[in-house]
Amino acid sequence: MKLKHIKHIFFDLDHTLWDFDKNSALAFEKVFSLNNVEVDIRSFLNIYEPVNLNYWKLYRNAEIDQQQLRYGRLKDTFDALEFTVEEELIHLLSEDYITHLTTFDHLFEDTIDVLNYLQPNYQLHIITNGFSTAQEKKLTVSNISHYFKTVTNAEMAGVKKPNPIIFNHALQLANAKPAESIMIGDNYEADVLGALNVGYDAIFFNYRKDESEPHVKQVSKLIELKKYL
């Protein structure tokens, strides 16, 4: 069912367009190699990925700050692996990871095709909870920054999704109205519910195939957005 009223499309970046898990794995491989950390990368990632998602939830809810996020997710993962790493090295790994993460450019399947398809008919935007400098580098290195009229991040808005303030800030920046806007993202709480609560429409990018409310629009591949837009 095509949505006729939409003029502005707001995308999340990490886990929606930019393939965070793939790029993150490559960054950890490089960082561990540079710092001679001999940990099995597959075992590390199996524990790290859910730990990281939980830390980001705490960060979204303002229960931890940026430094606690970056240190805690590594410390908890190494502890779960019973792999001893000095505190100083964890801080160094955390910094190196942020540096190298943004040098990788893997996007989700069909990202470029979908952006090329949408751009002639809509104004495209980003709303992200990621850190400003890192997100700008991801957009540039993956060569997709030119698709987006505006980029709203949590540092700029002073709050994180699903807080209504960041969605309203994005509308103001884009000169858009909620009724003509749609949010597309992988996080049901932050992206979908956050946008719906402000009056946007929303599409859940459910590539993990999580359980969700049946009335919410969703796709498991980006190319399926053509059904709606």
Image (cartoon, rainbow, N blue to C red):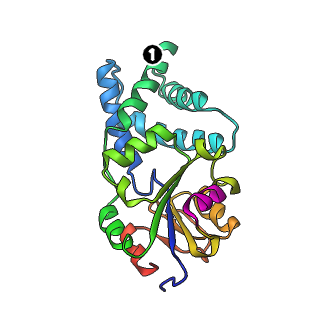
- Residue bounds of the magenta highlight: 167-175
Question: Does any portion of residue 123 appear in the rendered image?
Answer: yes
Residue placed at 39% from the left, 67% from the top? 222
The residue lying toward the viewer, choosing from 27 and 171, is 171
Based on the displayed image, in which of its 4 quarters is residue 195 positioned? bottom right
Q: Is residue 11 left or right of residue 117?
A: right
Residue 218 rendering spot, x and y as whole percentages:
51, 71
43 part of magenta stretch:
no
Q: Residue at x 31, y 32 (%)?
A: 29
Locate residue 4 relative to residue 196 in the image: left or right: left
- The secondary structure type at the circle numbered 1 is helix
Q: Is residue 169 magenta?
A: yes
Image mark count: 1
In the figure, 24 relative to 71: above or below?
Answer: below
Q: Position of residue 112 (x, y in %)?
A: 31, 62
The amino acid on which the numbered mark 1 sits, given as a three-letter code, is Leu
Residue in the image at 44% along x and 57% along y:
16
On screen, 150 above or below 183? Answer: above
- The residue lying toward the viewer, choosing from 36 and 38, is 36
Residue under label 1, please give it: 89
**Residue located 53% across and 77% down the image:** 6
In the image: residue 51, left or right of residue 23:
right
- Magenta-drawn stretch, dominant element (helix, strand or loop): helix
- Residue 58 % position (x, y): 65, 40
When the figure is inspected, residue 23 is found, relative to residue 180, above or below; the finding is above
Estimate the x, y position of residue 72 in percent, counting from the top left: 57, 28
Q: Foreground: 95 or 168?
A: 168
